[in-house]
Image (cartoon, rainbow, N blue to C red):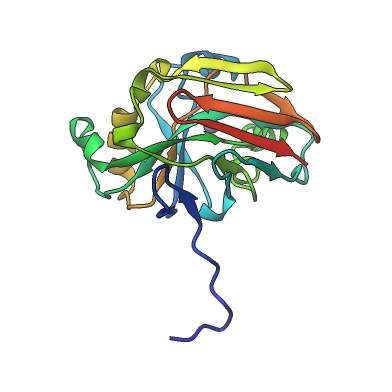
Amino acid sequence: MSFVFTPPPVVSVPVVGTTERFPVHRIYCVGRNYEEHAKEMGFTGREPPFFFMKPADAVVVVEAGQTGTIPYPSLTNNLHHEIELVVAIGTGGKNIKAADAHKHIFGYAVGLDMTRRDLQGEMKKQGRPWCIGKAYDHSAPIGPITPAAKAGDVANAELYVQVGGKDRQRSNVSKLIWNVAETIEHLSAAWELQPGDLIYTGTPEGVAAVVSGDTMVGEVRGLGTLTVKVA
Ligand code: MN
């Protein structure tokens, strides 16, 4: 087969403990999945889960021990960090029950759902799609994927992000409103999950702005750290 131009490369994320990489299919994100974050965004925190997406090539892969760099994006004056547990799907499926969800999980990673908050807010106000606030280029930094068997007790892992060495967000995955298994159940009722899908599971309270020159250091315990500098 020949193409009218060179196809884009497959986006892939390193996997801890192997030279093989995880090819990315889609990026799903869960909105307002920690109660205290829902409250800080002006909601009660007790609503069914909802989802948005980012394009696969929004991923910014940060290899183990490296510092990733993202450009300060265009059109915004309020770029926010959202530290999140990311679930990597290894086996696809639809209408997956929460009790079976673990069979579909390849592993876990630390991710940042970077957000042009001012643009997202404007779109919300107008009842328009969030894409310009959430799904822009370089909006999905991610660290290496740890296979599920080596990831430890992810459901009770502390997660945090620091900027300039100071805590911005600090919480625990146990505080998810919809846990990973329930999220997979809801998500797979709406879309057929595929191997290579990533799920950014939501962020705890403390979202705030970063500016050019800031360095974010995020961690989900057991999954290593993710360091990203804003150029
Ligand atoms: Mn998020």
51 relative position to 131: left or right = left
Q: Residue at x 44, y 53 (%)?
A: 24
User: In the orientation shown, which residue stands out farthest toward the bottom?
Assistant: 2
Describe residue 4's horizontal placement relative to residue 93 as left or right: right
Of residues 68 and 112, which is closer to you in this image?
68
Q: Position of residue 106 (x, y in %)?
A: 32, 43
Q: Which quadrant of the view contains residue 175?
A: top left
Indicate whether 56 appears above or below 168. below
- Inspect this view and state whether residue 180 appears: yes
Q: Quadrant of residue 139?
A: top right
Question: Can you give x and y, in whole percent of width and height, for residue 117 in the image?
Answer: 68, 32
In the rendered image, which quarter contains the N terminus? bottom left
**Image point 59% across, 37% down: which residue?**
127
What residue appears at the point 34 percent right and 45 percent down from the top-left corner?
Answer: 89
The x, y position of residue 7, in whole percent, is 53, 73
Residue 178 percent across, percent down from the top left = 36, 24
Residue 44 appears anywhere in the view: no
Identify which residue, 15 or 205, lies in the foreground: 15
| Number of marks drawn | 0
From the image, which quarter does the C terminus lie in? Answer: top right
